Amino acid sequence: MTSENHKTTQRQDNVDPSTGIDQLKEHQISESEQSKRKETVDFANASVNLSGLEVTEGMKRLGERYISGEIDLEEFLAISQQENASALSK
């Protein structure tokens, strides 16, 4: 066994088997990227509020998922469009 294989094994041993893929994504973005994402979400929320609208709890949770790295921008946009379509049909 090479040292490279050993390192791979060590990394795999450090991952809890019950951890889902989405939870692992959280660790794939840097603190810098998380900070940028937080600024972006905060700006968007402020813009919505200044427009006289209210950010829903669902959208707040979606923003948190985006900031943590659980979802990317494409997923964020797709889910938010679905949420908006659902809200408009009520």
Image (spheres, rainbow, N blue to C red):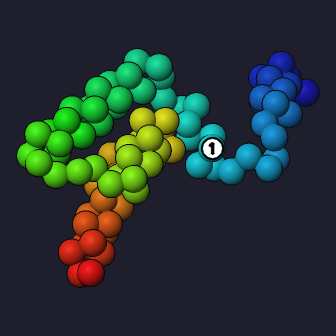
Q: Residue at x 44, y 48 (%)?
A: 61
Q: Nearer the viewer, residue 43 or 27?
A: 43
Position of residue 8 in the picture relative to residue 45 (left or right): right
Position of residue 46 in the picture relative to residue 50 (left or right): right
Q: Nearer the viewer, residue 74 or 61?
A: 61
The residue that label 1 is drawn on is 23
Q: Residue at x 91, y 27 (%)?
A: 1
Position of residue 61 in the picture relative to residue 12 (left or right): left
Q: Is residue 41 above or below residue 21?
A: above
Most extreme residue toward the bottom, as rendered? Answer: 89
Camera sees residue 88: yes
Q: Nearer the viewer, residue 77 or 56?
A: 56
Q: Residue at x 47, y 20 (%)?
A: 31
Q: Residue at x 80, y 23 (%)?
A: 7
Quadrant of res 37: top left
At which x and y percent is residue 20? 68, 51
Camera sees residue 75: no
Quadrant of res 24: top right
